[in-house]
């Protein structure tokens, strides 16, 4: 196994484009409040949500972005930013906990906290919720569960969305993902590590579904996308079930993956989304899912997808077999699925629900809206690129070092995370974590100008 230093050197040779998708060009320099938005990782579901929020509201707020890794590596930068922030927007309870630790004795600004799902109301989650001024829930059911805890904080429902212009039916590319051409393919999208959270991804149910479906579907194949599936795939193969591990791919290739599978399967017990359901539906790929998170609000059983109660293996298998047996049903379900999410559940549409809680946060701010300086906006934009590239690099290295992925997969993962970012972003990312840029004094000077 290569030492981390040599892997770092190799990964930094990945070619990249200069254009940065995180930046939307110049905006009017009107008065706006400053927000520090925090996410677990930059290039996965929650990180993508953060970027959609920034895109939708970046003309009204000056967003500064940090991930969990950056908070731990640069607590000095956190302490430089916090006094100038009007509020913070943590998207996970761990992000809020790390922020508190990095802040030290500094008081935290008010926070708006997005609760995606709750496996248990552990202390970290309770502290994040109790410290929040506003709470966001993904569904009305989650809103009810949060309010039942009696925290006394306003809870607003903001549903997950999908970029239907990106996620749409395209020409399949099974060869690209190592999928057999003639197989009936069940696709599974997510990270295996999510199942370590109380078994919420339902991998035991998945194994039962695969065993039963294999006896009824000739040419069945399972294709996993995400992190940590190598061992799972080997176990399926040892049981005689055809399976492969696609790894981590750029977001731009996700529509090709969804278009290359016949069914997207979700066996979860607890979810806030999952967003993958919306992505598959936008790509006209039939979804078979347990009734978690947004599924009950989105899927009308038998019309635009199929849903069952959690752990209902026979029903999951029955729906998969029905789709296997009729190409016309797959096409009809897929067309209805896209029609049901294309406009109603676009990110632009769903994030409108943030207007009310953001307006309340604005009203609570004790500072008047100052005119945003070009230097401050530029620094915030450059930080986004630096955080994205370096977070992706460190995530890949840590995943490889922890045995979740192989060195080649780590290489592809970094390339995927860097999609749309340039050499300047990479250089700034390296300087960010080595503390040779984004110095405390320079950031404070920019923010106070």
Image (spheres, rainbow, N blue to C red):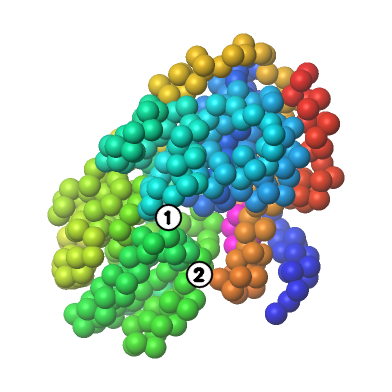
Q: CA distance from mark 1 to mark 2?
A: 21 Å
What residue do we see at 62% from left, 59% from top? 395
Q: Nearer the viewer, residue 108 or 112?
A: 108
State the image coordinates of residue 322 (x, y, percent, origin top left).
Answer: 16, 67
State the image coordinates of residue 238 (x, y, percent, origin top left).
Answer: 39, 88
- Number of marks in picture: 2
Q: Nearer the viewer, residue 385 or 207?
A: 207
Is residue 167 rendered to the left or right of residue 321?
Answer: right
Which mark is in front, 1 or 2?
2
Mark sitting earlier along the chain (1/2): 2
Is residue 337 rendered to the left or right of residue 222?
Answer: left
Q: Secondary structure at mark 1?
A: helix
- Asked if the residues shown at circle 1 and circle 2 are in contact, with their CB atoms under 8 angstroms apart, the answer is no
Residue topped by disc 2 = 228
Residue 99, visible in the rendered structure: yes
Residue topped by disc 1 = 255
What residue do we see at 37% from left, 53% from top? 119
Is residue 271 rendered to the left or right of residue 63?
Answer: left
Quadrant including the C terminus: top right
Quadrant including the N terminus: bottom right
What residue do we see at 72% from left, 42% from top? 75
What residue do we see at 40% from left, 48% from top? 121
In reply to whether residue 365 is colored magenta, the answer given is no
In the picture shown, does residue 433 fall above or below 216? above
State the image coordinates of residue 72 (x, y, percent, origin top left).
Answer: 68, 49
């Amino acid at each position: 196994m290569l030492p981390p230093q040599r892997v770092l050197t190799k990964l930094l040779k990945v070619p990249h484009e200069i254009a940065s998708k995180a930046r939307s060009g110049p905006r009017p320099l009107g008065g706006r409040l400053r927000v520090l938005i925090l996410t677990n990782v930059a290039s996965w579901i929650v990180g993508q949500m953060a970027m959609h929020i920034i895109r939708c509201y970046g003309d009204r707020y000056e967003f500064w972005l940090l991930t969990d890794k950056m908070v731990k590596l640069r607590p000095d930068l956190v302490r430089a930013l916090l006094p100038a922030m009007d509020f913070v927007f943590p998207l996970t309870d761990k992000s809020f906990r790390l922020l508190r630790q990095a802040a030290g004795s500094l008081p935290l600004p008010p926070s708006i906290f997005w609760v995606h799902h709750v496996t248990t109301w552990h202390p970290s989650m309770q502290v994040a919720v109790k410290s929040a001024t506003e709470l966001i829930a993904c569904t009305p059911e989650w809103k009810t569960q949060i309010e039942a805890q009696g925290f006394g904080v306003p809870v607003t429902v903001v549903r997950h969305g999908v970029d239907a212009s990106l996620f749409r039916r395209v020409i399949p590319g099974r060869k690209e993902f190592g999928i057999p051409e003639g197989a009936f393919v069940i696709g599974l999208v997510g990270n295996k590590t999510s199942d370590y959270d109380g078994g919420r991804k339902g991998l035991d149910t998945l194994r039962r579904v695969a065993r039963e479906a294999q006896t009824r579907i000739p040419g069945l194949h399972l294709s996993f996308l995400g992190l940590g599936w190598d061992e799972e795939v080997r176990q399926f193969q040892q049981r005689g079930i055809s399976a492969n591990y696609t790894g981590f791919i750029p977001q731009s290739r996700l529509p090709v993956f969804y278009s290359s599978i016949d069914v997207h399967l979700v066996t979860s017990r607890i979810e806030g989304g999952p967003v993958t359901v919306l992505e598959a539906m936008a790509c006209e790929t039939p979804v078979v899912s347990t009734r978690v998170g947004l599924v009950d609000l989105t899927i009308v059983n038998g019309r635009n997808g199929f849903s069952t109660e959690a752990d209902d293996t026979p029903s999951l298998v029955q729906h998969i077999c029905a789709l296997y047996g009729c190409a016309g049903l797959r096409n009809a379900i897929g067309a209805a699925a896209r029609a049901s999410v294309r406009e109603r559940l676009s990110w632009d549409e769903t994030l409108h629900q943030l207007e009310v809680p953001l307006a309340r946060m604005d009203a609570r701010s004790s500072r008047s809206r100052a005119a945003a300086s070009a230097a401050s906006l530029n620094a915030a934009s450059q930080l986004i690129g630096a955080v994205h590239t370096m977070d992706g690099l460190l995530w890949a290295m840590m995943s490889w070092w922890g045995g979740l992925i192989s060195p080649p997969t780590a290489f592809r993962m970094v390339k995927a995370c860097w999609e749309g970012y340039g050499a300047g972003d990479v250089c700034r990312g390296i300087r960010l974590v080595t503390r040779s840029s984004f110095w405390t004094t320079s950031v404070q000077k920019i923010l106070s100008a």
